[in-house]
Image: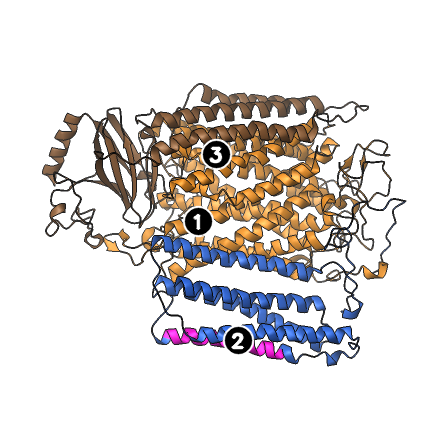
């Protein structure tokens, strides 16, 4: 049988710089490229949020140098109302698509999914390479809209029609800006579809000997489930973006209504539907939330298990819960549209599954808490971020109770309550998952350790800072503070401005902590302590049984064979407190979970 | 590549291999030389899983277009249009191409089964060429329909029904180009004697799907418009 | 480190709860007949969500405190009841919670959307456009004249596109930039958008409804307190979105009659 183990897509290690580091078909290089892209995008997104927060807290404050970014948008360094909306749209789009989708899913998934399944590479490495470069192109197209005369689109990341479909008369950036936005997202979808194709096939077909589906680590399961969501969700968003582009360039009326009047001119268009856009967008949009968070659930479980020195109470229940989240995410998308003029009966129909989705989420949290009980918890930067993730996930999750109910949503829809909710649960929590993964896997990815002290400083500032930013958002929302306002001129909003000042200071503080992280990341990459061995955290899954960093074909000339469940920690009678999946040690009666 | 697998001490993995994914995911893969006769793989090769995944995604895309049509119909009724008659001829062409592709698959299977693949150049490819020709004819027929409409002054923006007509037919045609690319690749592999059954199977699944998708789209357009 | 972390979690959880418990930034006071249902639903949800929030954060903090410094000989313990117990607990606790909230929530929702406006409800038309609301009262004849989008002209203050020379119904229509309504009288609001998506949000009235371009949307409510409130737009509609607002004046019947007469004279 040994001679049959040749790879389906054999490719030797590349020699030229370009094939090695730029147009590489090695999933590990592609994973790192995705990580670098996400890091760049996150920095841009964060700077945008700083500018926005300064403007919200301190009104007409001049931000030195802002006019360099946009002459029209910030004359005399003071932001115009439209420029605020443009930055807000770009912040949302960059963060949701190019950070929260790429980092936990595409970056870590690319690097570790084939290793954790025991494969030499993804089955379609050229598609994988295309996936990254297509995504990168999408990013360039999006950023290019900053440099058009009228700037990027101001329609928000949800890009509701018909504002997004009527062209320049709708506002600055609503012409070319929207076309670039929609083109960027359509291209992005292609990249993610290619990625998902590889992820699914890797999980199903490329597992090494002995690696049954239930022996896959929770991270691999999370990426697998996410890729199924990605495959279906992005396949719907892409046609929606194409139709939107056609409304701009071909004069069609998919989203342009009849008899819209701006500046006393009746706009062309007939019978187009704003609800059409909302249905297509949210059919993608809600699964997208779970595309951002489910890999985080996997990463956090993986990191926690290693640092708790015990498996989760139930491996299967966590997998089924993640599956249930994915499945339900398609049935709840209408809760974004409670007050949008949709049939009120369908609002109720969407409300129930939305409430039901709290059950699998609660199960996940309870399993985490129950597994913490009686564990031997190790505290390090990775486990701190993983525990912080749980705290954030709870805080962001409970506010979902309010928004799931259409009657309360009448009050809270489109307020800062919603902004607080999704920033905690899909922004901060997902970021904490990324950070936990970074501190945890950095030695495997680079061969060096990250600085623990800086990591802890980063954690403390982020944890306290994030709460200081996003908890007050909820209070503002309850008081009726509408989102997407660049200034608060309404009588009842003026008393709330001090809260916005506080949030701005907290945001700058928390943002500064992220710069420490970036410094730590770059410094450790080149000058960090060399990893003491291949398995610094004493983990069990396959990534820890290969060299650090892994060779081109992941396992050298020794294909792994798996004999154990993924998380054999503190097994009675074993020689160490962890038994690796490849270990040939025979355990009594613990091989399979009951 | 030499593999030194260390064997387990006593126990065999307890779990039975899951049907279709081989021995706990373990696959005996096709030798890199591409000699199809030596394939003893019981689990599907990635190309075969991958094609189903890709088809699922294409299905979602066209489901999105369909639901777009239904939602759009809810706000403003679609205008009735007459489909260009050549579409019905094109339908026959794409169905015929699926039949010829099946003939080709049977022929190649019989050829490989007979163990005559030592003489690679003799792998029968006649039906593949016929399929490719019919496929090209289909695309030409679709193009003819668009040109015909254009001559009547009907374009994408004429009314919403034509918008959907163009979007669906063009999106389908673009996907058919992917299938044509696959066919060209298969023919190329026949000539380089590197054809794997999985490649041929994946390509033919994709091609049949395109045929089925076209019949579905034609019915949709015919019923809704 | 772990103990400080545990304490921090507890402090943050308590600090987060304080503004809610102290009503530091409360919901605006309710002035509608249906709003109490929403408020009750909100309060119930706040109790359930708040308690779940505090309980889970405390539990997390407690476990971190307790299990982060194991002695060398400590064995791994399993949570009593195991995964099965937790799954059952989740289904029971959250399941009932969901069911209760869902079932009771229907009542509040139904009060807004499933009841038809009464026959003597006062019709008022509202038009949203970039970046202002305009209101139209049918006048003495009780009928709104037809709209002609091509006749809309901001310069001539013809915001709705009325043709007062040819449409007799339009002649007595009263168009205003602010909305006045009599107290304790049901209002039937006929909403349409002139251009893009907007929304009609009056927190005190407990109403929020999007304008859907190309569709006529209706809403009905009764205000119970005299006063001046703000109508704000909550659907991103362009660069002036933040400044798109109008005043809603709830008046006594006499004041309203005087106001409408005065407005009619201004037409």
Quarter holding residue C231: top left
Q: CA distance from mark 1 to mark 2?
A: 36 Å
As drawn, the label of residue B93 is 2
Residue at mark 1: A279
In the image, A79 versus A104, the foreground residue is A104
Answer whether labels 2 and 3 touch (C-beta < 8 Å): no
As drawn, the chain in orange is A
- At which x and y percent is residue A89? 44, 46
The answer to if A25 sits in the magenta stretch is no
- Please tell me how many numbered marks the rendered image carries: 3
Q: Quadrant of the N terminus of chain B?
A: bottom right
The chain letter for the residue carrying disc 2 is: B
Q: Residue at x 38, y 59 (%)?
A: A248
- At which x and y percent is residue C110? 37, 33
As drawn, the chain in brown is C
- At which x and y percent is residue C10? 58, 22
Q: Quadrant of the C terminus of chain B?
A: bottom left
Residue at mark 3: A420
Are there few (<14), some (14-19), or many (20+) residues within 10 Å of tag 3? many
As drawn, the chain in blue is B
Start-end of magenta stretch: B129-150
Q: Is residue A501 above or below residue A28?
A: above
Are there few (<14), some (14-19), or many (20+) residues within 10 Å of tag 2? many
Q: Indicate which disc, 1 or 3, sits on the residue closer to the N terminus.
A: 1
The answer to whether residue A500 is seen in the rendering is no
């Amino acid at each position: 049988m040994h001679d049959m183990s040749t790879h389906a897509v054999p490719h030797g290690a590349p020699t030229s710089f370009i094939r090695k580091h730029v147009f590489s078909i090695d999933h590990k290089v592609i994973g790192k490229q995705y990580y670098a892209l996400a890091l760049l995008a996150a920095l841009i997104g964060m700077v945008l949020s700083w500018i926005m927060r300064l403007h919200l807290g301190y009104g007409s404050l001049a931000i030195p140098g802002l006019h360099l970014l946009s002459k029209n948008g910030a004359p005399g360094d003071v932001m115009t109302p439209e420029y605020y909306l443009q930055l807000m749209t770009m912040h949302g789009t960059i963060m949701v698509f190019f950070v929260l989708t790429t980092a936990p899913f595409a970056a870590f998934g690319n690097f570790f999914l084939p290793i954790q399944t025991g494969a030499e590479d993804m089955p379609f490495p050229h598609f994988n390479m295309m996936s990254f470069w297509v995504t990168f192109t999408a990013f360039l197209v999006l950023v290019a809209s900053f440099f058009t005369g009228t700037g990027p689109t101001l329609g928000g990341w949800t890009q509701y029609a018909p504002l997004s479909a009527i062209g320049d008369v709708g506002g600055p950036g609503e012409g070319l800006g929207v076309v670039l936005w929609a083109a960027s997202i359509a291209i992005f979808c292609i990249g993610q579809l290619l990625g998902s194709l590889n992820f699914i096939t890797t999980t199903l077909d490329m597992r090494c000997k002995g690696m049954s589906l239930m022996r896959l680590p929770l991270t691999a399961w999370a990426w697998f489930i996410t890729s199924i969501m990605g495959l279906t969700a992005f396949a719907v968003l892409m046609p929606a973006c194409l139709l939107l582009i056609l409304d701009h360039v071909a004069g069609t009326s998919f989203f342009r209504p009849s008899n819209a009047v701006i500046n006393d001119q009746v706009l062309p268009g007939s019978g187009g539907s704003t609800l059409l856009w909302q249905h297509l967008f949210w059919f993608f949009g809600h699964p997208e939330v779970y595309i951002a968070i489910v890999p985080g659930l996997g990463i956090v479980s993986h990191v926690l298990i290693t640092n708790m020195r015990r498996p989760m109470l139930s491996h299967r229940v966590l997998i089924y819960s993640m599956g249930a989240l994915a499945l339900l995410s398609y049935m709840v998308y209408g809760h974004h549209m409670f007050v949008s003029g949709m049939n009120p009966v369908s609002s109720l129909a969407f409300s129930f599954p939305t409430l039901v989705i709290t059950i699998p989420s609660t199960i996940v949290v309870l399993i985490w808490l129950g597994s913490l009980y009686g564990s031997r918890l190790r505290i390090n930067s990775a486990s701190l971020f993983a525990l912080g993730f749980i705290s954030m996930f709870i805080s962001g999750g409970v506010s979902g109770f309010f928004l799931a109910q259409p009657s309360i949503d009448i009050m809270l829809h489109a307020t800062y309550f919603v902004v607080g909710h999704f920033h905690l649960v899909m922004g901060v929590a997902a970021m904490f998952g990324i950070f936990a993964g970074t501190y945890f896997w950095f030695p495997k990815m680079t061969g060096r350790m990250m600085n623990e002290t800086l990591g802890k400083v980063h954690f403390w500032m982020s944890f306290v800072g994030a709460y200081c930013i996003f908890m007050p958002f909820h209070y503002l929302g309850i008081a009726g503070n509408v989102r997407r306002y660049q200034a608060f001129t309404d009588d009842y909003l003026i008393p709330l401005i001090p809260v916005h000042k506080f949030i701005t200071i907290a945001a700058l503080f928390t943002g500064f902590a992220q710069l420490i992280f970036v410094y730590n990341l770059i410094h450790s990459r080149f000058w960090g302590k060399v990893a003491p061995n291949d398995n610094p955290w004493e983990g069990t899954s396959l990534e820890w049984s290969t060299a650090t960093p892994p060779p081109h074909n992941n396992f050298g000339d020794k294909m792994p064979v798996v004999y154990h469940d993924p998380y054999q920690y503190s097994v009675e009678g074993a020689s160490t407190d962890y038994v690796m999946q490849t270990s040939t040690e025979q355990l009594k009666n613990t091989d399979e979970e009951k | 590549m030499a593999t030194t697998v260390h064997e387990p001490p006593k126990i065999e993995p307890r779990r039975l291999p899951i049907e279709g994914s081989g021995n706990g995911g373990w696959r005996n893969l096709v030798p890199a030389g591409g000699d199809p006769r030596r394939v003893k793989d019981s689990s599907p090769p990635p190309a075969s899983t991958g094609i189903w995944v890709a088809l699922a995604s294409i299905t979602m895309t066209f489901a999105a277009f369909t639901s777009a049509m239904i939602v759009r119909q809810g706000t403003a009724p679609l205008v009735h249009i007459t489909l260009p008659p050549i579409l019905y001829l094109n339908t026959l062409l794409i169905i015929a191409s699926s039949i010829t592709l099946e003939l080709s698959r049977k022929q190649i299977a019989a050829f490989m089964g007979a163990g005559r693949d030592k003489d690679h150049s003799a792998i029968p490819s006649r039906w593949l060429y016929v399929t490719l020709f019919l496929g090209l004819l289909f695309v030409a027929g679709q193009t003819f329909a668009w040109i015909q409409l254009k001559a009547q002054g009907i374009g994408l923006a004429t009314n919403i029904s034509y918008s959907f007509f163009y979007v669906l037919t063009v999106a389908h045609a673009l996907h058919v180009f992917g299938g044509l690319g696959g066919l060209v690749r298969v023919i190329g592999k026949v000539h380089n004697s590197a054809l794997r059954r999985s490649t041929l199977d994946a390509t033919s699944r994709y091609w049949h799907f395109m045929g089925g998708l076209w019949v579905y789209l034609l019915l949709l357009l015919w019923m809704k418009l | 480190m772990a103990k400080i972390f545990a304490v921090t979690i507890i402090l943050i959880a308590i600090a987060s709860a304080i503004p809610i418990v102290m009503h530091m930034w409360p919901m605006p006071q309710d002035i509608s007949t249906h709003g109490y249902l929403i408020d009750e639903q909100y309060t119930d949800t706040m109790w359930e969500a708040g308690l779940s929030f505090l309980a889970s954060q405390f539990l997390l903090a407690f476990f971190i405190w307790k299990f982060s410094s194991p002695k060398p000989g400590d064995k791994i313990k399993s949570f009593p009841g195991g995964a099965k117990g937790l799954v059952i607990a989740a289904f029971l606790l959250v399941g009932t919670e969901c069911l209760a909230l869902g079932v009771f929530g229907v009542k509040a929702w139904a009060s807004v959307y499933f009841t038809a406006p009464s026959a003597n409800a006062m019709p008022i038309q509202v038009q949203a456009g970039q970046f202002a609301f305009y209101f139209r009262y049918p006048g003495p004849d009780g009928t709104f004249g037809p709209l002609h989008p091509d006749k809309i002209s901001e310069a001539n203050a013809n915001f709705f596109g009325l043709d007062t020379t040819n449409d007799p119904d339009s002649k007595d229509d009263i168009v205003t930039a602010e909305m006045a309504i009599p107290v304790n009288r049901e209002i039937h609001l006929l909403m349409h958008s002139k251009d893009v998506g907007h929304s009609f949000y009056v927190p005190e009235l407990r109403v929020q409804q999007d304008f859907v371009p190309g569709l006529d949307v209706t809403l009905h409510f009764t205000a119970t307190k005299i006063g001046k409130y703000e109508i704000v737009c909550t659907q991103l509609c362009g660069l002036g979105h933040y400044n798109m607002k109008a005043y809603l004046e709830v008046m006594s019947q006499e004041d309203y009659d005087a106001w409408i007469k005065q407005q009619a004279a201004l037409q």
